[in-house]
Amino acid sequence: MSISTTPPPPAEPVPLWHGGAILQPSSHFSREVFNVLRTVVPRHSWPVGQPIVGLFLPIPSGMGLMAEFEHLSGESKKHAEQAVLDKGVSLVLESPAAPQAVAVFRAKRWRDIGMYALLPLLFAIPIVDGLFPNGGHATILIAVADFAVLVASQLRMSQAQKALVESRFIAHIPTPGMRIKVNG
């Protein structure tokens, strides 16, 4: 039995995002994040002359972004990441993940409509059946159709949430005193 002392070959690097965007410091989203961070990160904690690199991960509900910042340390990093999460939907709608977040909101709306319509329909079946002969059959058909809409919208919402989570992206956040060229 021999023990090999050579390390295994390095694995191929796995990309952090699939088709994700890399936003420059001059992008609208990067400037919005700078405005959020400016209030929570002390001036002495900012790196000098280089942007802060942040990986942004949308949460499945579409109600916020989780961030992981490089070039910040300690409490400043924690406060910056929490400030981005606290900013919520307004920051998500400025991000490249906005179309996926809107798809989640729409799918959730249809799911909620199907869910809240199903309960009264289920209670209406015995009432309608007692009032109208064969009326319960129509109510049952409507309830089954509503249940099908509910299941389809739940599946669509799950797919939309998966697409939203996979729409992570990287943004370079400008720092105080850094010169950027604002496009248009």
Image (tube, helix red, strand yellow):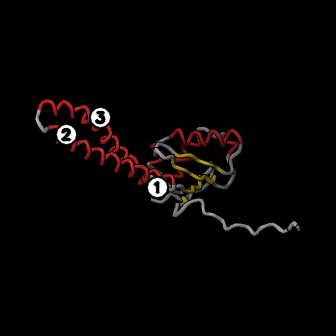
Q: What is the distance, in whole Å, between disc 2 and disc 3 at their CAs?
A: 12 Å
How many other residues sit within 10 Å of disc 1, few (<14), some (14-19) or many (≥20)? some
Labels 2, 3: front one: 2
The residue lying at 30 percent from left, 48 percent from top is 148
Labels 1, 2: front one: 2
Q: Position of residue 6 (x, y in %)?
A: 84, 68
The type of residue carrying mark 1 is Ala
Q: Nearer the viewer, residue 28 or 150?
A: 150
Q: Position of residue 140 (x, y in %)?
A: 22, 41
- Determine whether the residue tagged by mark 1 lies in a helix, strand or loop: helix
Q: Earlier in the sequence, mark 1 or mark 2?
A: 2
Q: Nearer the viewer, residue 122 or 172?
A: 122
Q: Residue furthest left?
A: 133
- The quadrant in which residue 142 appears is top left
Q: What is the distance, in whole Å, between disc 3 and disc 1 at their CAs?
A: 30 Å
Labelled pair 1, 2 in contact (Cβ < 8 Å)? no
Q: According to the image, label 2 marks what residue?
A: 139
Q: Earlier in the sequence, mark 2 or mark 3?
A: 3
Q: According to the image, label 1 marks what residue?
A: 163
Q: Nearer the viewer, residue 122 or 163?
A: 122
The residue lying at 25 percent from left, 31 percent from top is 123
- Determine whether the residue tagged by mark 3 lies in a helix, strand or loop: helix
The type of residue carrying mark 2 is Thr
Q: Is residue 71 left or right of residue 139?
A: right
Q: Point out the image quarter for the N terminus.
A: bottom right
The type of residue carrying mark 3 is Leu
Q: Position of residue 100 (x, y in %)?
A: 43, 53
Q: Earlier in the sequence, mark 3 or mark 1?
A: 3
Q: Nearer the viewer, residue 157 or 143?
A: 143
- Determine whether the residue tagged by mark 2 lies in a helix, strand or loop: helix
Q: According to the image, label 3 marks what residue?
A: 119
Q: Position of residue 77 (x, y in %)?
A: 66, 43
